[in-house]
Image (cartoon, rainbow, N blue to C red):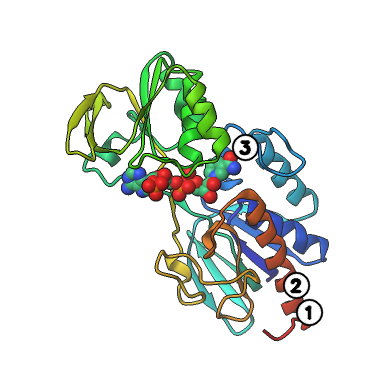
């Protein structure tokens, strides 16, 4: 029986682990895929205070190392069920069960797919969701990136250093990415923009050979690319916890800045929570708030809402 179980080993979950350990609580953080979460595959983080330029991997290693050094237990395990027990909460991950008195949900979000028919079959065969992980496979080749947020523009910039040509395909004519990334993309000679455009078909049998790009005016053009990097945002996967924490229309945990859910002893932190800004800074903030609230709840010193 741990004091605090944490679901998710990204910035929110590991920050919660650091705060909880420093408050003297026993902690287990369970991660389903890779510690660090989304940021682990980011080539460069430039907007985290006091770390002007750090790779996602270095940032993750430092964060994970810090949590472990403070005595947090971390394990791989995809949590598929969570329930309230007489003494707290029980999580099921594969064949293992874990019990804790309080629960912090820091499940993050995963990559949204385009939803095209052969997208799954071509994933790993030209279709990718991580430029940092797979970009090197496309050295001197033509590639495309879909999306208009920070991830898409970062990927386009990263790929422009490796690939011959990168086409950035975005469904509108303005980007939601930070101005710095928009400016950097504009300065890359081998990055072309396909604005007001959507990828409507993926071509290739055993590997991607090209994509159809349909403009807002209905015109369709074929783009021969060996790689397509899909960066069209994130979707949460919070279904297993819906009985404990209410979900909003988008599937995010309905919890405010205090990270409180409808179940006493259950807290939601980071990108999995309803919020307007999903960044490392806000994930770290949530992790600290959720852990502090969980400790207060365990100690019986929590303020009434
Ligand atoms: P995002 O900001 O939600 O952007 C998703 C992009 O994909 C949008 O441009 C959206 O178009 C487009 N899109 C969504 N569904 C689509 C579809 N079905 N077909 C085509 N295009 C589609 O996602 P993100 O870029 O992954 O970023 C997620 C969060 O992480 C954001 O808060 C971001 O700031 C943060 N982040 C930060 C950094 C950093 O360096 N600080 C790096 C990466 C991510 P519309 O614009 O038309 O909606």
Res 38 visible: no
Residue nearest the viewer, comparing 91 with 254: 254
Q: Which residue is mark 1?
A: 299
Cβ–Cβ below 8 Å for labels 2 and 3? Answer: no
Which comes before the other along the chain, label 2 or label 3? 3
x%, y% of residue 252?
47, 65
Residue at 19% across, 38% down = 217
Label 1 – label 3 distance at C-alpha: 35 Å
Q: Residues within 10 Å of mark 1 (few under 14, many from 20)?
A: few
Q: Residues within 10 Å of mark 3 (few under 14, many from 20)?
A: many
Depth check, mark 1 against mark 3: the one in front is 3
Residue 226 is tagged as none
Q: Quadrant of residue 290?
A: bottom right
Q: Position of residue 172 (x, y in %)?
A: 35, 42
Q: Quadrant of the C terminus?
A: bottom right
Which quadrant of the figure contains the N terminus? bottom right
Near mark 2 (Cα within 10 A), the count class, few <14, some 14-19 or many ≥20, is many
Q: Would residue 290 appear left or right of 129 to someone viewing this image?
A: right
Is 294 above or below relative to 70? below
At a point 55% along the width and 80% down the height, the residue shown is 262
Q: Secondary structure at mark 1?
A: helix
Percent of width and height locating residue 49: 74, 44
In this view, the residue in front, 291 or 280, is: 280
Which x, y percent locates residue 40?
58, 40
Residue at coordinates 32% horizontally, 22% vertically from top-left?
A: 226
Q: Label 2: which residue? A: 295
Do residues under tags 1 and 2 come within 8 Å of each other at their CB atoms?
Answer: yes
User: Based on the displayed image, in which of its 4 quarters is residue 14 positioned?
Assistant: bottom right
């Amino acid at each position: 029986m741990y004091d605090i179980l944490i679901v998710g080993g990204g910035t929110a979950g590991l920050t919660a682990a650091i705060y909880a350990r420093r408050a003297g609580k026993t902690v287990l953080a369970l991660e389903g895929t890779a510690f660090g979460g989304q940021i682990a595959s980011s080539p460069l983080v430039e907007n985290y205070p006091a770390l002007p330029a750090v790779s996602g991997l270095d940032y993750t290693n430092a964060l994970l190392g810090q949590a472990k050094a403070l005595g947090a237990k971390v394990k791989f395990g995809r949590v598929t069920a969570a329930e309230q027990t007489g003494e707290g909460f029980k999580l099921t991950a594969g064949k293992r069960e874990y019990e804790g008195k309080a629960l912090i949900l820091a499940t993050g979000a995963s990559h949204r797919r385009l939803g095209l028919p052969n997208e799954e079959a071509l994933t790993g065969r030209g279709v990718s969701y991580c430029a940092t992980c797979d970009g090197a496979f496309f050295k001197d080749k033509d590639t495309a990136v879909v999306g208009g947020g920070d991830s898409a523009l970062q990927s386009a910039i990263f790929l422009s250093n490796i690939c011959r040509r990168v086409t950035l395909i975005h469904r509108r004519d303005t980007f939601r990415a930070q101005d710095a990334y928009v400016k950097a993309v504009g300065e890359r000679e081998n990055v072309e923009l396909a604005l007001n455009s959507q990828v409507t078909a993926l071509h290739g049998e055993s590997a991607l050979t090209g994509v159809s790009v349909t403009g807002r005016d209905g015109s369709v053009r074929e783009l021969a690319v060996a790689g397509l990097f899909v960066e069209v945002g994130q979707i949460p996967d919070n279904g297993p916890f819906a009985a404990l924490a209410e979900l909003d229309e988008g599937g995010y945990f309905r919890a405010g800045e205090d990270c409180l859910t409808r179940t006493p002893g259950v807290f939601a932190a980071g990108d999995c929570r309803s919020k307007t800004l999903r960044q490392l800074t806000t994930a770290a903030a949530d992790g600290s708030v959720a852990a502090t609230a969980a400790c207060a709840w365990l100690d019986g010193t929590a303020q009434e809402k």
